[in-house]
Structure formats: C-alpha cells, structure tokens
C-alpha cells in the first residue's frame, strides 16, 4: 500500500499504459480518477477498481479545468497527476505530415501539460506538496526517422519536465517523466505504420532486451516516482525501454 491515503488523476487512462498505471495506483491504496476522452473506456477501467471515471479533452482548457475542479470536489485534494494522454501521426516524411495532424500532436502531447499545470499547480502550491509525472517517450531521447514531429513533441515533454521541476522544487512539488519504448497499446499500430510480424520483428531488433514495454513495466516505474520513496527525485526523465536508448 505504497500510495495509501493518496489521490491521483491519470489522463489517457482508458487503455494501455494509462490503464496499467491507474490500476496499480489503486492496488497500492490511492483513490484514482480515470480520465480519458473515451467515456466508455474510462468507465470500464474505473469500474475495475471502484475508481472515478471522467471524460476529458486534455487539449482543451475548459475541459481540463473541469477535470481538476471535479477531482478536488470529489477527492478533497489531489496529490498526484500523471500526464499520460498522447497521440502520434503516422510514419511519413516530415514534410508530408498534415498541418491538422501536427497541431493535434502538439495539442495533446504538449499543450495538455501546460493546461494541467495551469489548473493544478496552484492547488499543489497551496498544500506545499504534489507530484507530476509526464509520460514522454524514447522518441524524445533517441528519435526515429519518419516520426519527426512526434519525436519533437516528446523531446518537448522531457525539457518541460526539467523546467517544471526546477521551478516548483521550492514549493515541494516534484516533476518527473518516463520514457517508454513502444508497447502493446493503441498507439503501436500508428508507430509501426502497419502491424505485421515483419514490422514487429524489425522494431524489436532495436530493443536490446527484445520485447516491448508493458503497462506493468510503466506502472512499476510510475509507482516508484510518485511514491514517497522517491521524495528526493525530481527532474528525472527515466527510460523504461529495455536498453533502446543505449
């Protein structure tokens, strides 16, 4: 029960890494708001552990504000925020990515971090405590060709994590990030372009441990960074990637 008495919001928690993190936090004693743009998916995950489902568009300021207000109203306060929601564009030459796709990637992957900080940091500052975990990607550490603007958005998240950490440290607010390699999530097909045994084998060949990240891998790392065991850790962008970035 490493999060006993804690409260948490996990965005993009209706599936994949977010669902794994939300479920592990609940097992460890936290009250969890499962936030996702897919209302049905959020409800399904929340119902699996008696959590709170909330429908949110993390790229929209009013939607994010409503999520934070509801979380504080129901939970009393918020201790932990996991910015997990993310999207990508299909693999293609950088000049062929459409402007709407570019805007969507940066709105969901980057603007959302700003919006949740704008809405929640004042609450954290009032309480002089809190932890934020941003889910970035190995794409932001060691970029792959043909995912250029997705790579850039995740690099932005890593830099934002460090900038947030150094500014918020005097308020006893910690900010860290995880950089997973691709995993069995709804985004995998988008990363591969086409989900075939050949494409999977090609991708796996770049990972020394020879497998994709799993929701359990991410949940274990997230649990540590959001727990009191990591009270001296802030500004860290931890690679959970089977050695991909070596």
Image (cartoon, rainbow, N blue to C red):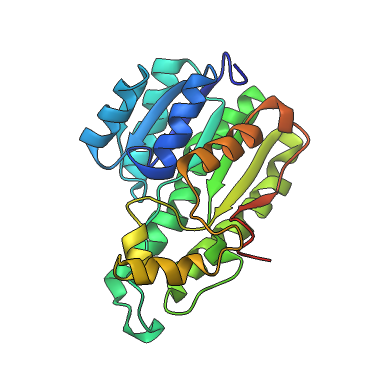
**Where residue 50 sits in the image (x, y, percent)?**
35, 16
Q: In the image, residue 135 lies at what x, y percent? A: 52, 49
Note whether 174 is above or below 26 in the view shown: below
Q: How many marks?
A: 0
Image-quadrant location for residue 187? bottom left
In the rendered image of this protein, does residue 155 appear above or below residue 236? Answer: below
Residue at horizontal 51 percent and vertical 26 percent from the top: 25
x, y percent for residue 72 = 44, 22
Is 243 on the left-hand or right-hand side of 67?
Answer: right
Query: Is residue 190 rendered to the left or right of residue 246?
Result: left
Residue 220, quarter of the rendered image: top right
Between 23 and 95, the one nearer to me in the picture: 23
Horizontal side, residue 168 vs residue 215: left or right: right
Residue at x 60%, y 64% (from the top left corner): 244
Residue 233 visible here: yes
Residue at the image point whose x is 34% and y is 33% from the top? 66
**Residue 176 found in image quarter:** top right
Tell me, yes or no, if residue 103 can be seen here.
no
**Looking at this view, is 193 or 112 the one in front?**
193
- Quadrant (top left/top right/bottom left/bottom right) for the N terminus: top right
Q: Residue 112: x and y, percent?
A: 43, 50
Residue located farthest toward the left when viewing the structure as drawn: 40
Identify the image quadrant of the C terminus: bottom right
Residue at 76% x, 37% y: name it. Answer: 170
Is the residue 38 above or below the residue 22 in the image? below
Asked whether 52 or 91 is in front, the reply is 91
- Is 227 located above or below residue 105 in the figure? above
Left or right relative to 68: residue 234: right
């Amino acid at each position: 029960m490493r999060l006993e008495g804690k409260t948490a919001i996990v965005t993009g928690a209706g599936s994949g890494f977010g669902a794994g993190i939300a479920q592990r936090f609940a097992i460890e004693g936290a009250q969890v708001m499962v936030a996702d743009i897919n209302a049905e998916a959020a409800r399904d995950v929340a119902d699996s552990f008696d959590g709170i489902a909330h429908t949110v568009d993390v790229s929209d300021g009013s939607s994010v504000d409503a999520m934070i207000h509801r979380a504080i109203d129901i939970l009393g306060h918020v201790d932990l925020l996991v910015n997990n929601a993310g999207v990508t564009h299909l693999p293609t030459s950088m000049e062929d990515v459409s402007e709407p796709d570019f805007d969507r990637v940066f709105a969901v992957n980057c603007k959302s971090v700003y919006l949740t900080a704008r809405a929640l940091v004042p609450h954290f500052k009032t309480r002089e405590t809190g932890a934020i975990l941003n889910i970035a990607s190995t794409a932001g550490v060691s970029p792959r060709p043909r995912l250029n603007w997705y790579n850039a958005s995740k690099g932005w998240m890593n830099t934002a994590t460090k900038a947030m950490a150094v500014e918020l440290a005097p308020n006893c607010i910690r900010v860290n990030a995880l950089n997973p390699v691709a995993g069995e999530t709804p985004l995998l097909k988008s990363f591969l372009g086409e989900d075939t045994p050949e494409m999977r084998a090609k991708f796996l060949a770049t990972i020394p441990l020879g497998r994709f990240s799993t929701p359990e891998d991410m949940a274990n790392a997230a649990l540590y960074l959001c727990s009191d065991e990591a009270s001296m850790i802030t500004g860290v962008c931890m690679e959970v990637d089977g050695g991909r970035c070596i």
